[in-house]
Image (tube, helix red, strand yellow):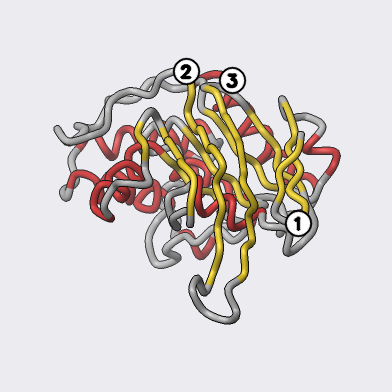
């Protein structure tokens, strides 16, 4: 992979991650708590992800996969239990601290790329860095350009994201997820809307970054062939995790 000039990390960035990236203990998640329609979706989840693991998540629709990913990604809070991300116990953090922890340590790749189509591929990759620092500089642009090169899109880096193919857009989304050099990447069915060749390319990119940089990846998929290429697979069925 290309070497890039590192952009300046703000002074309040969380410390470097240790061996355990995610640790969930007895995590439950319920919705409409305290009302007659209270529904518990996750039931006492225990889950540990170590640095450098590439883990598939499988399960039928409605099983709780997205809820689990939202909790690990600090987009939602558990109803009970404990959740530590990169060594920080998160259940007692306020929203500002959660945003800081998420922004510096977690990258996201979704089924739909969620790029800003009026911005170039390069500008989209720069967005997480701009959000963290509040300003742009040469180092950020060079880092983004290196990532664009890593996903094979240097020739298209100045093209508007809306003019790229679906596979190219998802590769930009992978580069954007890695812009802050996160300890953890959450990939929520990132190949679900792609043809077989493009899906394989996106998976291979995530696997390469995982192996080369030690990035932990949690990869939600319905594709058994892709899951078989991961280090391990956990199954979510009726709000319970196994495997």
Cα–Cα span, label 1 and label 3:
32 Å
Which label number is shown at residue 73? none
Kindly tell me whether residue 198 is visible in this rendering: no
Whether label 2 touches label 3, CB < 8 Å: no
Q: Residue at x 79, y 51 (%)?
A: 222
Q: Which residue is mark 1?
A: 238
Q: Secondary structure at mark 2?
A: loop
Mark 2 or 1: in front is 1
Residue 14 horizontal/vertical position (percent): 27, 32
Which residue is rendered at x = 50% and y = 61% of the image? 114
Q: In this figure, which residue is indicated by the disc labeled 2?
A: 19
* Quadrant of the image occupied by residue 192: bottom right
Measure the alpha-carbon separation of dots 2 and 1.
Answer: 30 Å
User: Going from the N terminus, do you reach mark 2 or mark 3 first?
Assistant: 2
Viewer-proximal residue, 45 or 143?
45
Query: Looking at the image, which residue is at 48% across and 23% down?
Result: 20
Residue on which disc 3 sits? 211
- Picture quarter containing residue 41? bottom right
Q: Position of residue 102 (x, y in %)?
A: 36, 45
Which secondary structure, mark 1? loop
- The first of marks 1 and 3 along the sequence is 3
């Amino acid at each position: 992979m290309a070497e890039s000039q590192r952009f300046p990390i703000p002074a309040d960035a969380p410390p470097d991650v240790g061996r355990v990236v995610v640790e969930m203990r007895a995590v439950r998640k319920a919705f409409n708590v305290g009302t007659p329609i209270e529904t518990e979706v996750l039931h006492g989840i225990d889950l540990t992800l170590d640095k450098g693991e590439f883990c598939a998540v499988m399960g039928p629709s409605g099983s709780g996969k997205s809820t689990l990913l939202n909790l690990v990604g600090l987009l939602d809070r558990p109803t009970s239990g404990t959740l530590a991300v990169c060594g920080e116990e998160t259940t007692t953090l306020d929203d500002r601290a959660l945003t800081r922890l998420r922004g510096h340590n977690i990258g996201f790749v979704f089924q739909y790329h969620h790029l800003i189509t009026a911005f170039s591929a390069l500008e989209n990759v720069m967005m997480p860095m701009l959000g963290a620092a509040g300003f742009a500089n040469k180092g950020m642009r060079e880092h983004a350009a290196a990532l664009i090169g890593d996903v094979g899109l240097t020739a298209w880096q100045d093209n508007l994201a809306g003019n790229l193919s679906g596979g190219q857009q998802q590769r930009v989304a992978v580069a954007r997820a890695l812009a802050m050099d996160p300890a953890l990447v959450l990939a929520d069915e990132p190949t679900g809307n792609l043809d077989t060749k493009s899906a394989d390319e996106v998976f291979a990119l995530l696997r390469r970054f995982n192996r080369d940089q030690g990035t932990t990846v949690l990869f939600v998929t319905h594709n058994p062939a892709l899951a078989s290429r991961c280090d391990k697979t956990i199954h979510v069925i009726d709000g319970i995790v196994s495997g």
